[in-house]
Image (cartoon, coloured by chain):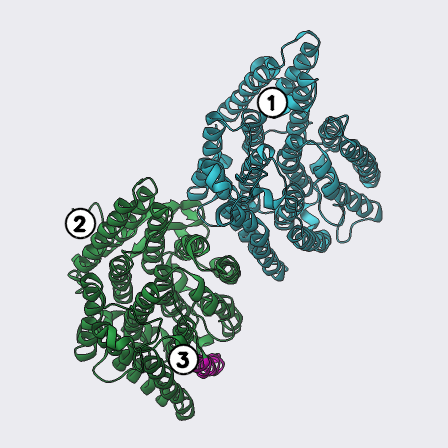
Chain colours: A cyan, B green
């Protein structure tokens, strides 16, 4: 509750403040300060079990908070905070409406918090829309760039289409439900086979959610949108927003349709396999790191779909770990990418010599994305596999997943190879090209912090998971 | 203090690990070299000291086994311990590194601090593999040992290093992931962890004991076996999973090749003994003909290729495939003598192959040539090197009095008891080994001196010392192998009881 209200309020403050603030750097500090406060407020709610008494609104059970979703919100807020610290300067460079960009991100966070705590289909819809609409704007925020415009339009058209499907699904479920209720744990699914209306509603909801988390075959928007959007916003979209989509996906299907899982599990299996194969195989052929990361985000979504596939306690723990590991590593690698002068893989050649800290931390991020032990990425994949095997059905899916993880090593390690084992190409004056600009000690220190977090979670994931079972 | 605060396996893991991490911060090349040498000798001392507590008493148990809570909610703990086979292989690991560091002491590396740091980290990873008593921990170390080697080979290796090392990496990584799936499936069948008060701490457990207590049906064993075996087969490597190996050995820097072929391949053999046989006795019996057949085919196949090789490094690489094939075949005979032979041969092969690589490296340092056909007459220029090499080469073809004779004799006895035809076919590889090893010696060391070998000088005292130590170990184990049998006796008994 704290997070929902405070992010909305602070977003409004920043949006209005933009009209009065002339300084270009001030919004960044306002955003960091505000977000730190929201983050602490959320932790306080997690710790004590109650929101601030001022914000303790009676939601008529429309929202449901427990340690599971509060931990997730904490991860989303914490990751965004790190993202602000790492990339605040880059947000300033996108255009002149700096304050509004930050405000929009706060609105997205409000949507994240809503879609993490929803208890009715309406709030879910509200949350997903509050996430999506600011993202359409952020994608097109580089106004003079045609690619950015195109991406924004594409995202908007496809996004509204999927929203329509989602609404239709919600309507079907409402209509097909004897209790005529929007509450997700109040849907009467009937004995044996589900009625047709409910089945159609479920499939529509699944399609809409799969679209939002860019699962195949509903992923076609992802590479173009991620590639066209300003890199700094791609970083945000492909991490925190995507994790939030998965969180909503899991909560929806667990609470509303968990009991009839055998009836729809095959669909998820098909989506998962398609996502894993398409994401990984296409990423192999990319030359641009930014596009490669877009496909890698599809590939990682394939692994996160295991949580929907398995729907057990290990899957929940895995999803929390995955959100943290994937968000941190991807934010880190994007922060590095933004500073690079050349976005192709060859642009990373010889980075280890010029920027040893950047190269070393990038290696940690990439190892984590690959899932090498001692990184958080391994633990998250490990929990997902454990959850899937515990589920007991479709064992072959796990084999497909690990083979895809082996493929993913191919494209992640290409960057490591470029950084460490190749030399920078020479410029006109026969000196090695300068590979990265605008790198200062504060940036390096922050990268080290992110890398350290990944390693700590990799060695001891209990630090995070214990909070799931925390009772105030 | 020992046993109360710290135990041998912990020391063996932490010392190289911490020394390796510290090494990255050293500025001077010479300091880094000396630091790594110093640390590896320290590890050797600990390993030797641990042998004094190997009598099977309570005290030796207390000083060699420890378990800490690590991930309680999934029932995994940081459990490490030393049994007989573990002691033998940690000893091999501990002996190898100082010798490798001394022989390659003169070699200049760019960014030496990182090189030696990664070498020590790989040693720590290997120690962990040999000591882990928890399946998840084992998997952790199994993968972690790979990462430093990946960086070592790709950064400091030969011309085609990046592609060759990457092939090696992807192969082993894919194998490891399949192993992980196997482990996780097995894990679901283990009993819950329950504390003294009767509370369930975790639904299942990753500890070795818990895994051993699971009784699988034959059908389950038959397919789970492959999930485990493929990972181990890639690491050893067994035909047809061997294609990464010659390229990787050829392209890696000499010091890393020694680690790879001397110690890392033993991870696979060790894992079969520690995990595969006790966990899947029925499946091992079910698939024995297939695995032995593949191994023997691989032995002859690799030996024939070795005969044709002109590149001295590839020759040694293929000879290694042949030797490992025999070890794998001997384990799957499930005879006591065959397995005992494999255990001693793991140690002997490690020593011998490292010795061979050292000679290859010393030759290449002086001449810069890898082709057998371009070398000749080295014996006239470097008599000491030649004598030492001949002893190591004779050990490589398992002549009596050398260490390999004991192991190979026992392994062949096992194979013979299992099936005479297998033994006969495998026996061909002994002849072939003599052909390529002696042929190599003849071409490289005898015959006329040519332009490339004119300036070859005999080796320095430190290098002599290392090769002499290796020769001494070869003869010691060859003449008096009883201490090794005593060391691994209990582990042997355990394996045999599991197989029945």
**Which residue is identified by label 3?**
B329
Which residue is pictured at 24% across the width and 72% down the height? Answer: B385
Sooner in the amino-acid sequence: mark 3 or mark 2? 2
Q: Secondary structure at mark 1?
A: helix
**If the image is split into quadrants, where does the N terminus of chain A sit?**
top right
- Which of label 2 and label 1 is nearer to you? 2
Dot 2: element: loop
Q: What residue does disc 2 label?
A: B2
Residue B343: horizontal and vertical position, in percent? 30, 73
* Left or right of A159 in this view: A110: left
Distance CA(mark 3)–CA(mark 1): 63 Å
Q: How many marks?
A: 3
Q: Which mark is residue A3?
A: 1
Pick the front one: B18 or A75: B18
Which one is in front, A229 or B25? B25
Question: What chain is tagged by disc 1?
Answer: A
Q: Which residues make up the magenta segment?
A: B286-308
Discs 2 and 1 carry the same chain letter: no
Residue B179 visible in the snapshot: no
What separation in Å lies between label 2 and label 1 (alpha carbons)?
52 Å
Vertical arrangement, residue B48 with respect to residue A367, above or below: below
Q: Position of residue B342 (x, y in %)?
A: 32, 76
Q: Tell which subunit mark 2 falls on.
A: B
């Amino acid at each position: 509750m704290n997070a929902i209200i405070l992010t909305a309020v602070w977003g409004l403050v920043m949006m209005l403040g933009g009209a009065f603030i002339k300084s270009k750097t001030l919004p960044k500090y306002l955003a960091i300060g505000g977000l730190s406060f929201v983050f602490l407020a959320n932790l306080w709610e997690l710790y004590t079990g109650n929101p601030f008494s001022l914000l303790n609104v009676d939601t008529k059970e429309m929202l449901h908070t427990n340690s599971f979703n509060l931990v997730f919100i904490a991860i989303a807020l914490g990751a965004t905070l790190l993202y602000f610290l790492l990339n605040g300067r880059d947000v300033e460079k996108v255009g002149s409406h700096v304050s509004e960009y930050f405000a929009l991100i706060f609105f997205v966070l409000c949507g994240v918090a809503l879609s993490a705590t929803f208890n009715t289909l309406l709030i879910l819809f509200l949350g997903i829309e509050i996430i999506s609409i600011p993202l359409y704007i952020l994608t097109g925020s580089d106004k003079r760039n045609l690619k950015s415009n195109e991406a924004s339009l594409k995202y908007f058209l496809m996004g509204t289409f999927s929203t329509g499907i989602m609404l239709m699904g919600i309507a079907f479920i409402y209509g097909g439900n004897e209790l005529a209720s929007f509450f997700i744990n109040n849907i009467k699914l009937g004995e044996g086979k589900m009625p047709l209306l409910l089945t159609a509603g479920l499939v529509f909801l699944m399609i809409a959610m799969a679209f939002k988390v860019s699962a195949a075959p509903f992923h076609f928007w992802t590479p173009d949108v991620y590639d066209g959007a300003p890199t700094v916003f791609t970083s945000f979209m492909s991490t925190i927003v995507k994790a939030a989509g998965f969180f909503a996906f899991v909560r929806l299907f667990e609470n509303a349709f968990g009991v009839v899982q055998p009836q729809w599990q095959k669909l998820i299996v098909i989506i998962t396999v398609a996502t894993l194969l398409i994401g990984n195989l296409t990423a192999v052929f990319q030359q641009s790191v930014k596009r490669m990361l877009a496909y890698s985000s599809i590939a990682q979504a394939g692994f996160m779909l295991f949580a929907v596939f398995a729907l057990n306690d290990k899957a929940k723990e895995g999803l929390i770990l995955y959100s943290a590991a994937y968000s941190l590593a991807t934010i880190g690698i994007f922060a590095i990418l933004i500073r690079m002068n050349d976005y192709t893989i060859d642009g990373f050649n010889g980075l280890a010599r010029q920027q040893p800290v950047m190269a070393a931390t990038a290696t940690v991020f990439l190892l984590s994305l690959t899932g090498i032990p001692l990184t958080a990425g391994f633990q998250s994949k490990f929990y997902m596999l454990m959850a899937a095997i515990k589920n007991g059905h479709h064992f072959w899916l796990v084999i497909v997943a690990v083979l895809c993880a082996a493929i993913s090593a191919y494209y992640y390690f290409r960057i490591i190879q470029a950084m460490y084992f190749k030399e920078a190409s020479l410029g006109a004056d026969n000196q090695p090209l300068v590979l990265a600009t605008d790198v200062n000690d504060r940036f390096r220190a922050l990268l080290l912090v992110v890398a350290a977090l990944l390693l700590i979670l990799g060695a001891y994931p209990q630090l995070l998971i214990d909070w799931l079972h925390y009772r105030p | 203090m020992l046993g109360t605060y710290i135990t041998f396996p912990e020391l063996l893991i932490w010392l190289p690990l911490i020394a390796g991490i510290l090494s990255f911060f050293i500025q001077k090349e010479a300091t880094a070299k000396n630091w790594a040498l110093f640390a590896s000798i320290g590890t050797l001392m600990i390993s030797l000291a641990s042998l004094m507590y190997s009598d099977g008493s309570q005290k030796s148990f207390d000083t060699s086994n420890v378990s800490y809570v690590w991930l309680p909610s999934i029932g995994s703990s940081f459990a490490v311990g030393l049994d007989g086979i573990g002691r033998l292989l940690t000893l091999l690991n501990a002996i190898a590194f100082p010798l490798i560091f001394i022989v390659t002491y003169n070699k200049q590396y760019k960014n030496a601090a990182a090189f030696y740091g990664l070498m020590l980290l790989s040693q720590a990873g290997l120690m962990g593999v040999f000591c882990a008593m928890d399946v998840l921990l084992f998997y952790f170390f199994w993968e972690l040992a790979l990462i430093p080697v990946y960086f070592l080979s790709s950064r400091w290796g030969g011309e085609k290093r990046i592609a060759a090392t990457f092939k090696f990496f992807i192969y082993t990584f894919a194998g490891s992931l399949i192993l992980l799936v196997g482990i996780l499936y097995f894990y679901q069948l283990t009993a819950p962890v329950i504390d003294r008060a009767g509370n369930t701490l975790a639904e299942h457990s990753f500890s070795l004991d818990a895994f051993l207590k699971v009784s699988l049906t034959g059908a389950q064993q038959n397919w789970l076996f492959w999930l485990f075996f493929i990972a181990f087969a890639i690491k050893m490597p067994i035909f047809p999973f061997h294609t990464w190996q010659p390229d990787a050995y050829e392209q890696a820097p000499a010091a890393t090749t020694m680690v790879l072929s001397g110690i890392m391949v033993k991870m696979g053999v060790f894992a079969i003994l520690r995990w595969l046989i006790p966990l899947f006795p029925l499946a091992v019996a079910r698939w024995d003909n297939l695995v032995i057949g593949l191994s023997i085919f691989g032995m002859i196949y690799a030996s024939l290729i070795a005969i044709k090789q002109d590149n001295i490094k590839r020759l040694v690489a293929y000879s290694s495939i042949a030797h490992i094939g025999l070890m794998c075949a001997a384990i799957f005979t499930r005879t006591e003598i065959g397995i005992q032979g494999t255990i001693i041969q793991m140690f002997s092969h490690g020593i011998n192959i490292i010795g061979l690589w050292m000679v290859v490296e010393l030759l290449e340092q002086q001449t810069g040539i890898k082709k057998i056909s371009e070398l000749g007459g080295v014996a006239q220029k470097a008599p000491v090197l030649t004598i030492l090499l001949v002893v190591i080469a004779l050990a490589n073809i398992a002549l009596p009095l050398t260490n390999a004779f004991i192991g190979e004799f026992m392994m062949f006895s096992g194979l013979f008891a299992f099936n005479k035809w297998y033994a006969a076919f495998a026996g061909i590889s002994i002849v072939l080994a003599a052909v390529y090893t002696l042929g190599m010696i003849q071409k490289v060391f005898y015959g006329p001196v040519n332009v490339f070998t004119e300036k070859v000088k005999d080796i320095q005292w430190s290098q002599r010392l290392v090769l002499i130590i290796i020769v001494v170990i070869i003869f010691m184990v060859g003449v008096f192998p009883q201490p090794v049998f005593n060391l691994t006796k209990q582990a042997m008994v355990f394996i045999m009881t599991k197989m029945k």
